[in-house]
Image (cartoon, rainbow, N blue to C red):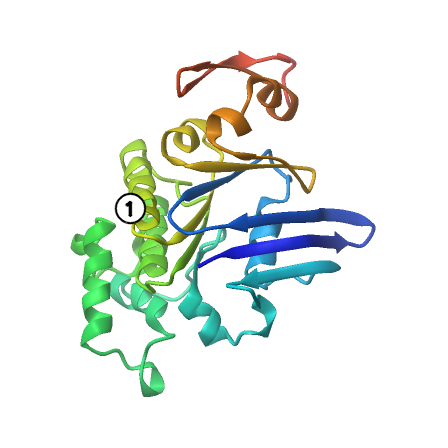
Amino acid sequence: MSLELRAARVCAGEAVLLADVSLRLTPGRLIGLLGPNGAGKTTAIRALLGLQKLAAGQALVAGQDVASLSARQRARLISYLPQARKLAWPVCVREAIGLGRFAYGGPLGRLGPTDRAEIDLALTRCDLVHLAARAVTSLSGGELARVHLARALVGQSPILIADEPTAALDPGHAFAVLEMLQTEAQAGKTVLVVLHDLDLATRFCDEVILLDQGRVISHGPPIEALSIERLAEIYGIEGVWDQKTLRIRGRINQTLMV
């Protein structure tokens, strides 16, 4: 199922957060959304989800305006893992993951056998079985990040968007998360993931969209979208491609940042 922005513009007062951005996401590929801090990545995601008011342009899912869909309809089409992932109430991990099934629940949100089976599967995939009865307020940042990923996976939507899903994760779990997202894409889903780790992006992503200052700078295979020239221009770093492996040599400008 496709998801796209058409000439989307987002403004905050005089500031332009997205400048007539057009992009199309198609099934079967893991697509990385990259760019420096403040490039417009989260704004672009919120625009795709219909959560961000557009000054101009459209956000479409399967050709339909995203903003015209109800919350339940949207949840059945798109699973979303946001960047801000706080849970203030002490529900157990299983219950927190079950919130991802609200679009399918019966009266009063009751869950049936299919819902419970999906929750069990998500617990296993995200290495959370041993934490199922724990209160989410007692978890570490990395454990909580995996809970939210499980909540996104359990919805079984044809489109999955994850905003920095590897934040706070150790290297082993970060690799596991990208492997899961890669599996979702290979199964035919449309998967978009925001990443800051260029190594993970080049290892796992089929396509990369590079944003800077609210504009799409490049979109294509990592080796093309993250050319040596663009790495220098956008990130201020020196990189070298060794076949399909990106190696970062260091910063071009060694002035300390404060």
Residue at 38% from the left image edge and 74% from the top image edge: 103
Q: Is residue 97 left or right of residue 233?
A: left
Q: Is residue 129 left or right of residue 41?
A: left
Quarter containing the C terminus: top right
Q: Position of residue 178 (x, y in %)?
A: 34, 40
Q: Position of residue 201 (x, y in %)?
A: 43, 33
Q: Position of residue 170 (x, y in %)?
A: 32, 35
Residue extending farthest to the bottom is 107
Q: Position of residue 145 (x, y in %)?
A: 36, 49
Q: Is residue 18 left or right of residue 121?
A: right
Residue at 52% from the left image edge and 13% from the top image edge: 250
List the residue tagged with mark 1.
Answer: 183
Disc 1 element: helix
Quarter containing the N terminus: bottom left
149 in relation to 197, above or below = below
Q: Is residue 157 left or right of residue 217?
A: left
Residue extending farthest to the right is 14
Residue 123 in view of the camera: yes
Q: Residue 158 lies in what quarter of the image?
A: bottom left
